[in-house]
């Protein structure tokens, strides 16, 4: 670096810091390539554009949910309410869609709004009541499940997805590219903009590094935390509406399989689970990695038990490669 | 003034005990049969599974860690138990030892990855959980049981001692007296608490931090295995159920929090966790005696958790400086 110092107030973080966090992203994408290579040795079909686009489409739902999770993990918290927030989003959207044209127009917004409300409850408890996020999100998950079941009596009154939901999840605006992938791309670009170019994004990294320092620097930390949780809830519910559109209907417990993969995708992408460090591209890589790993193991017709063991082992090994904490001594 | 210090130190445990007693009294008062050994036996048997996973979670949470693989270890042990806890008394003894040993090994794997691999416990145990579940699937691809499963032992563990006291309650009491209290008073036990409060300070004071943390994960595995053993006693079979595994993992966290164990580490006790688990388990019973829809159980569980953690935030009224807010 040169000796000439410029005013850095409006600048993005320094170059050296950027290179430092990019390392895990490179590693994660490297692992994706390695995985494809292993797959290609088994069958060249794994490199065909159709297969890859199909994987991106399947991964889009996880990608959108993991985007929200990343915001929460970046502030050093965790959101365990993902499963039922996803389900609430999909179910409520399908429920609203039953009410004529107005219902169809408002289906997705209302579904997402429900997720935002759940996120607001999480965020309020974490930011203002200082409740550990792990426990309040667990409670909110349980309450969301209970409310949804109480509302529907155990099964959805109307669970068919609206045409708009189906179009977003399965249609093709651009030839060959499923809309779900486009939606994921747009979500991702917005997330990158928020994280890299706005004060809100900067505040998120600041809070993740040291909340008290961010507070003393004039960051409205409590509002930012609430915002991060609301964003996470909204994106999870949005993912739920897309999932309902993809399957054609909302199903109870449809979000159950998304919690742990979402956390894994974020962490495999190099975001520190302690917060404050992470690059959005890493989350994209982590999502693709998890989706590909699942798909390749399925296509290879590896038995379920071996799939689970390989899945766990790969995550541990990858984290040992680049996710280790510094030595805590002294 | 010793007792005031003691009360302050054990506030979480005492609160958990009070909550449990209140809920259980309400349950008994409204139960048609009233306070009989049989009602007590049913209640103890329903609570013991959750109490055991809560004890397992306590050890790790005290070190400021978290174990998200507890449910998977429990299911894995249950599948193993459905194979080897069978045959003659001698064979059964070996089988029980094998199940607990497998739990200890699983816990040791978690401990090794967290301590020597320096991974965050939350992600490390998510990954190892998948491995344990894979092993459970090898053991029981479809739910089943050994034809020679030792049902005499199962009945004894779920029955009553002298026709009066539920055996599962005796087991929990024995764990407190023979495992927890000696542990709490040992150097390793104190180190576990110290490591949870401040790992660096504990290390600087020359305490065996690594050994204590490792032991915490091993204990977590052993108690998860004991819970798995009990699960097999209940169902007379082993089933690799992902839903059960996830439910018990999440319930174990809820139970330790209700039991006054701090998720930030260093505060709380297994005794509190047991009462937290029993209280959490009573929610379903209360719905039953008040004739409410059992489908509402998750709603009430969530609300009770919310109230419990919100009570904890009353300490914010004592904050004199805004900066204390962040610690």
Image: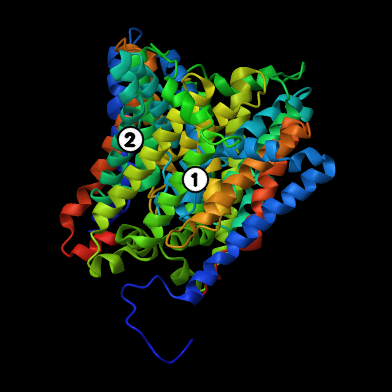
| Residue A121 found in image quarter | top left
Can residue B50 be seen by looking at this rendering?
yes
Do the residues bearing badges 2 and 1 touch, measured as CB atoms within 8 Å? Answer: no
In this rendering, the answer to whether A154 lies above or below B172 is above
For the residue pair A73 and B57, the one nearer the viewer reads as A73
In this rendering, the answer to whether A14 lies above or below A48 is below
Q: Give the number of the mark in front: 2 or 1.
A: 1
In this rendering, the answer to whether B47 lies above or below A126 is above
User: Could you say where residue A171 lies in the image, as x and y percent from the top left?
Assistant: 52, 28
| Residue B150 found in image quarter | top right
A323 displayed left or right of A245: right
Task: State which chain disc 2 sits on.
Answer: B
Tell me the SS state at disc 1: helix
Residue shown at 39% from the left, 20% from the top = A94
Residue shown at 54% from the left, 32% from the top = A257
User: Could you say where residue A307 lies in the image, as x and y percent from the top left?
Assistant: 72, 37
For the residue pair B235 and A91, the one nearer the viewer reads as A91
Residue shown at 57% from the left, 39% from the top = A59
User: Could you say where residue B9 lies in the image, as x and y percent from the top left?
Assistant: 31, 53
Residue at far front of view: A175
Tell me the SS state at disc 2: helix
For the residue pair A280 and B158, the one nearer the viewer reads as A280
B190 displayed left or right of B227: left
Residue on which disc 1 sits = A185
What is the CA distance from the residue labelled 2 to the residue labelled 1?
A: 37 Å
Residue on which disc 2 sits = B305
Specify few, some or many for label 1: CA neighbours under 10 Å numbering under 14, 14-19, or 20 or more: some
Could you say which disc has been placed on residue A307 in the image?
none
A223 displayed left or right of B124: left
Task: State which chain disc 1 sits on.
Answer: A
């Amino acid at each position: 670096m040169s000796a000439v110092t410029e005013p850095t107030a409006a600048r993005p973080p320094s170059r050296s810091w950027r290179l430092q966090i990019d390392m895990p992203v490179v590693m994660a994408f490297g692992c994706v390539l390695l995985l494809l290579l292993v797959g290609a040795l088994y069958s060249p079909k794994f490199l065909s554009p159709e297969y890859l686009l199909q994987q991106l489409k399947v991964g889009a739902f996880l990608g959108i949910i993991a985007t929200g999770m990343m915001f929460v993990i970046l502030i050093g918290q965790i959101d365990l309410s993902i499963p039922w927030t996803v389900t609430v989003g999909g179910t409520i959207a399908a429920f609203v869609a039953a009410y004529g044209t107005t219902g169809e127009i408002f289906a997705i917004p209302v579904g997402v709004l429900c997720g935002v409300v759940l996120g607001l409850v999480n965020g309020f408890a974490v930011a203002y009541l200082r409740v550990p996020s792990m426990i309040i999100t667990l409670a909110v998950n349980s309450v969301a499940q209970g409310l949804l079941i109480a509302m529907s009596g155990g099964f959805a009154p109307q669970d068919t997805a609206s045409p708009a939901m189906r179009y977003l999840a399965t249609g093709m605006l651009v030839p060959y590219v499923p809309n779900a992938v486009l939606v994921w791309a747009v979500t991702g670009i917005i997330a990158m903009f928020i994280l890299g170019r706005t004060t809100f994004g900067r505040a998120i990294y600041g809070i993740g590094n040291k909340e008290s320092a961010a507070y003393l620097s004039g960051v409205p930390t409590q509002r930012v935390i609430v915002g991060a949780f609301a964003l996470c809830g909204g994106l999870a519910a949005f993912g739920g509406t897309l999932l309902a559109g993809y399957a054609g209907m909302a199903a109870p417990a449809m979000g159950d399989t998304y919690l742990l993969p979402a956390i894994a995708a974020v962490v495999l992408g190099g975001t520190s689970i302690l917060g404050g460090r992470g690059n959005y591209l890493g989350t994209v890589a982590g999502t693709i990695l998890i989706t590909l790993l699942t798909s390749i193991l399925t296509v290879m017709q590896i038995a379920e038990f071996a799939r689970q063991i390989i899945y766990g082992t790969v995550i541990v090994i990858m984290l040992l490669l680049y996710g280790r904490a510094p030595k805590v001594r002294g | 003034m010793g007792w005031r210090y003691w009360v302050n130190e054990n506030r979480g445990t005492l609160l958990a005990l009070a909550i449990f007693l209140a809920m259980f009294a309400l349950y008994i008062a409204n139960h048609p049969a009233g306070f009989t050994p049989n009602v007590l036996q049913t209640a103890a048997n329903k609570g013991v599974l959750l109490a055991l996973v809560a004890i397992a979670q306590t050890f790790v949470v005290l070190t400021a860690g978290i174990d998200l693989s507890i449910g998977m270890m429990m299911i894995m042990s249950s599948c193993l138990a459905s194979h080897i806890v069978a045959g003659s008394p001698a064979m059964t003894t070996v089988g029980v030892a094998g199940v607990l040993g497998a739990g200890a090994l699983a816990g040791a794997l978690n401990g090794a990855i967290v301590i020597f691999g320096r991974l965050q416990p939350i992600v490390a145990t998510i990954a190892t959980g998948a491995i344990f579940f894979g092993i459970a699937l090898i053991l029981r691809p479809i739910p089943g049981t050994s034809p020679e499963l030792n049902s005499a032992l199962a009945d004894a563990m779920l029955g009553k001692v002298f026709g009066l006291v539920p055996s599962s309650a005796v087991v929990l009491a024995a764990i407190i007296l023979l495992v927890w209290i000696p542990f709490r008073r040992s150097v390793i036990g104190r180190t576990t608490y110290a490591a949870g409060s401040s790992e660096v300070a504990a290390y600087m004071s020359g305490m065996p931090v690594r050994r204590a943390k490792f032991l915490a994960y091993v204990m977590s595995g052993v108690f998860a295995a004991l819970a798995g053993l009990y699960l097999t006693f209940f169902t007379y079979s082993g089933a690799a159920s992902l839903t059960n595994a996830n439910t018990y993992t999440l319930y174990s966290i809820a139970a330790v929090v209700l039991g006054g164990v701090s998720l930030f580490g260093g505060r709380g006790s297994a005794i509190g966790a047991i009462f937290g688990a029993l209280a959490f388990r009573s929610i379903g019973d209360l719905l039953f005696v008040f004739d409410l829809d059992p489908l509402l159980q998750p709603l009430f569980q969530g609300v009770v958790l919310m109230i419990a953690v919100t009570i904890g935030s009353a300490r914010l009224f004592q904050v004199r400086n805004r900066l204390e807010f962040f610690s």
